[in-house]
Image (cartoon, rainbow, N blue to C red):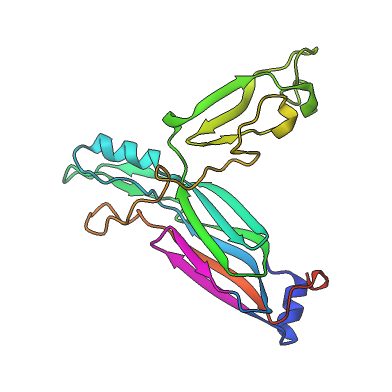
Amino acid sequence: MITQNLVDLINSGKAQFRNWTTGGTASSRIPVPKNNYIVITDFTYHHFAGRFLNNTTDEEIIKNAFDNCVNNLRFNSFGQDYAYTIRSGFNITRPIVGNSVVINFPNGDTKYDCYQVHKTDVHVDLWRFPNLDTWVLNGGNLSDKTSEGRAPYGYGTAPMNPPAFPVQRSIDFLGATFVPYGENQGIPLPANWRETFHSDINFNTILFPPAINDVDGQFTYPLINISYVLVNMPFDKNDR
């Protein structure tokens, strides 16, 4: 969200409020002029389901929609990386006429407030999260190094009294491993692990091209509106 220090910079003529739109593609860029920096204050994400649209049966359309409604969104610049995982909720109806299904998004978009400082060009990437049936779930009790609270306030560690409850200690999905408690888990960590719930960009997670020739394809591409403040000076932490 826009803060008072940014308003002061705008009112003094040292900054401008701007808007940037992107969509229809999985990768785009916000240019940042040299010796300037930007602060992204919010972005509006239009929910969609990037899905295959092989109209052989209704069941295939429904399954593909559910398989492809969770996406990763990342804003990345030199030294800065902001990652989001977003699930698009939708309803599916079958019209009386015809055999196709209609996918509706009750909440067509969501606004996310933020305060992202970027000193160089911002790369905006969007990709699919791997389907649930590809995950490898690794459950068990937490290590006491995690300092997780005892039951009933937390899932706890074992052995203890009250007893701990089993949790997902890690989740492997297509080359990346999510480890919620990181190194405090006391388990061997693979090379490509992270403590935040996001996947990697690869052949299995890239967005499908928009189905522009399909009547059900109107929600197969992203739309994002981004608001930011361009500050006409080099970045200085005193300006934040």
Depth check, front residue: 96 or 130? 130
Magenta span: helix, strand or loop, mainly?
strand
- Asked if 5 appears above or below 97 in the picture, the reply is below
Task: Say which quadrant the C terminus sits in.
Answer: bottom right
Residue at (43% x, 36% y) in the render: 131
Is residue 30 shown in magenta? yes
**Within the image, what quadrant is residue 4 found in?**
bottom right
Is residue 5 shown in magenta? no
Left-right relation of 189 to 202: right
Q: Position of residue 170 (x, y in %)?
A: 60, 28
Residue at the extreme left: 98
Left-right relation of 96 to 92: left
Residue at the extreme right: 238
Depth check, front residue: 60 or 103? 60
- Asked if 18 appears above or below 132 in the picture, the reply is below
Q: Position of residue 61 (x, y in %)?
A: 28, 40
**Within the image, what quadrant is residue 223 found in?**
bottom left
- Asked if 182 appears above or below 89 in the picture, the reply is above
- Range shown magenta: 17-31
Left-right relation of 174 to 83: left
Residue 141 in view: yes
Q: Position of residue 149 (x, y in %)?
A: 79, 26
